[in-house]
Amino acid sequence: MKTEPVAPLKITLDRVDPPVMRRFVVPLSIRLDRLHLAIQVAMGWTNSHLWEFRARDCGWGLPDPDFVDFDGPADARKAKLITIMRATGARTIKYIYDFGDGWDHTIKIQTTRDMPVGLDYPFFLDATGACPPEDIGGTYGYADFLADPEQRGDFDPAALDKRAIEKGLEALAAKWRRKPPSAKR
């Protein structure tokens, strides 16, 4: 039986209270642009801001074609999670979303194991805490938002629809599923 290396990831939104955490499994061969999409779905972000992965002194994101001479991040569409692990030795990676608000996430690669080829990933494991609303002003703006009942409205930081996260990750897995080679006629 063919196997592929996979890793359960624990993703924590830094410096927020109450805590926001997501756990799901991905193949180590996942491209970083796809890992970004999986995090967006799992966290509940809207994928409407710039983002970057950081490990040690290296960064991966989407290079801006208007700044070809700019020393920006390496292209995340051409890098895989296993590349980061091998190139930097890191088992903890930072994911920054929305450079204005500065939502920092810590990704911990808890372990790696071989699983049979053909399983669908990303695979949801667990989650805690509702994701803060977009464009709220980062961690300080979020704290102010939570402290103001009028501004907060019916937002509940403990409310979490785990089934919605699971369904969102399943939809990504179905979209990324390897298609069997078609028979030529």
Image (spheres, rainbow, N blue to C red):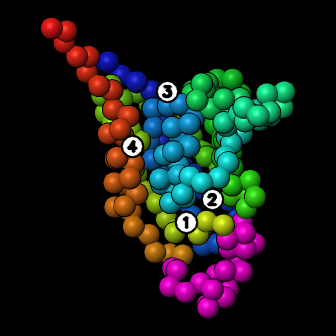
Q: Is residue 169 left or right of residue 47?
A: left
Residue farthest toward the top in the current orientation of the protein: 185
Q: Where is residue 171 drawn, in percent x and y?
A: 34, 46
Q: Is residue 174 left or right of residue 105?
A: left
First in sequence, mark 3 or 2: give its number.
2
- Other residues around mark 1 within 10 Å, as few (<14) / some (14–19) / many (≥20): many
Indicate the secondary structure of the residue bearing disc 1.
loop
Q: Which one is in front, 142 or 184?
A: 184
In the image, residue 140 lies in the stretch drawn in magenta: yes
The label nearer to you, 2 versus 1, is 1
Looking at the rendering, the stretch of residues picked out in magenta corresponds to 136-156
Is 145 above or below relative to 116? below
Q: Amino acid at mark 4?
A: Leu
First in sequence, mark 4 or 3: give its number.
3
* Residue 29 image label: 3
Indicate the secondary structure of the residue bearing disc 3.
loop
Is 38 above or below relative to 141? above
Q: Magenta stretch: dominant SS? A: helix
Q: Is residue 75 left or right of residue 129?
A: right
First in sequence, mark 3 or 1: give its number.
3
Query: Disc 2 marks which residue?
Result: 13
